[in-house]
Amino acid sequence: MVDEASRIRRSADVAAHELGGDEGGVLLHLKSGQYHGVDTVGWTIWNLLDGTRSIAQITDALRERFPDAPDRLPQDVTEFIDGLLSRSLVEIGEP
Amino acid sequence: MSDTPLRPGPVLEALLREGLGASTSAIKQRGPSMRGEIDWVSLCALSHRCRIAPVLYQCLRGSVHSAPRGVMEWFRTRYYENVAQNLALQNELRDLLRWLSEAGVPVIVLKGLALAHLGLGLARTSRDLDVLIHDGDLPRVDAILERHGYQAWPDPTHDFHRRYGRSTPSGTRVVEVHFTLSDRPRNYRPDVPGIWSRSEETAIFEAPARVPELQDHLLLTLMQVPHHHWAMRLLVDVWQVVLRWGDAIDWAGFLIRAGEWQMGVLTRSTLHALGTMFGVPIPSGAMSTSQPRGYLERVQWRVARGAIAEQLEHPFRPRMTYLAPFMMVDHPRELPGTIVKRTLGADASAEEDALHTAARRTTATAAALPALGRVLLASIAQPRSRGEE
């Protein structure tokens, strides 16, 4: 489980591709072969996960980009990142 | 509105025209064919069979014809799967090129990802990696691949490449290592030294790579068309190259080079078919040069169009599709020998004995004869307009 101060980085074992338009992107775990589709918000979060930002900073960046985001945005972001962690798509820690 | 569901072939054609880019007149010309109930299940099956479902998904996303939610979900899943597959291949390509580069082995990336890079991006369906090496480097490449977990597969049917496979948790990775490009049973003679000398450095999805020069690349793509039975996915590749890079192609020089490779008939008939059947914007000069000349070419052109139409109409009962590859020869004197050689089973595979090969091919040739007979008769008459040939 991560908290607002956690810093998360993308796993080196993941290949990612933006699909364009309103499609978001696809994440492929190269070792397991499992792939995942993420929507545009998920793709935005994925690109912010460089290990230098805390989850709170990521949430702030998202709120700037999506001003109409719901109040529960911090919770949604944390749940999304927990989902990425459980699938080994990201790791805790700075790069 | 018609009560009869539209056949999937014309719908697929119309969606490709609309989505990939065809001349406006071609889109308008086919507009009325989209009126009526679309048989979406058949369309899914056909696009899957043609290995262009991810491309069709992109076409449908921008189309005025809205597909039912479940159908779009099916196409979206195929697209996502394909992107993931291509990401895995990209990763494999990066590794492969690094291994070969470290060993000082020159390599040109062919087909698959190199074509995706030129046109459709990750919507293009690719199952393996294809690279060209100098034939003298084969033992070294063999050792490098073995060291990295690949095993050579027995592949005696082709004398121009060797296949290697490697098991990974996400499936088997396959590399085809071409040590020449001549396709002996079909008489095509690509200029391999020229391909090497004209090849260019680029980046394929950010991986540094050497690829064939654009016109060589287009000819090599066309050369695969008969080998893969006029597969729509290859025609879509040609379509995309023409659309995106047509201005950079010296069409007169390109057609001369096609003739030098003994691919003049194949190249001209395919360009002509793409222009007349799909509205692909082939430049007028190239289109004019691609008109059939004389009776035999009218037959060959009709056979090529018939093979393409079969992909869209009844891909599981091909007639022309079988015969067409052997008829695409530049010199008529080669025609009987090529058909007889292929029918009687020369170049048989290790998985099938020569008798079975000969029986299977003779049956296929016999099944194609009625369709060929109709073409021979229809070609006697001169075409009234360009699109009718």
Image: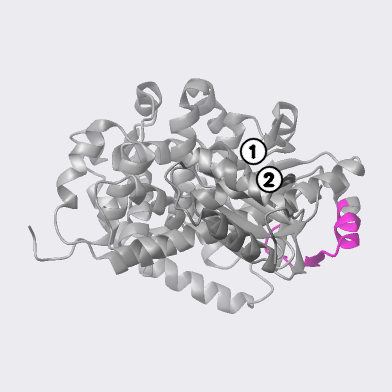
As helix, strand or loop, the secondary structure at mark 1 comes to loop
Residue A79 place in picture, x, y as percent:
59, 63
> Which is more toward the observer, B150 or B321?
B150
Q: Is residue B156 magenta?
A: yes
Residue B48 place in picture, x, y as percent:
43, 63
Please tell me whether residue B241 is drawn above or below residue B121 in the rendered image: above
Labels 2 and 1: the sequence-earlier one: 2
Q: Which residue does the image show at 66% across and 51% down from the upper left?
A: A55
Residue B123 place in picture, x, y as percent:
51, 50
Residue B300 place in picture, x, y as percent:
38, 45
**Number of numbered discs visible in the structure rendering:** 2
Residue type pointed to by label 2 = Leu
- Chain where mark 2 sits: B
Q: Which residue does the image show at 87% across and 60% down from the upper left?
A: B148
The residue indicated by pointer 2 is B181
The residue indicated by pointer 1 is B190
- Please state the extent of the stretch shown in magenta in the rendering: B141-159
Q: Which disc number belongs to residue B251?
A: none
Pointer 2: residues within 10 angstroms few (<14), some, or many (20+)?
A: some
Whether residue B362 is visible here, answered yes or no, is: yes
Q: Which residue does the image show at 91% across and 57% down from the upper left?
A: B143
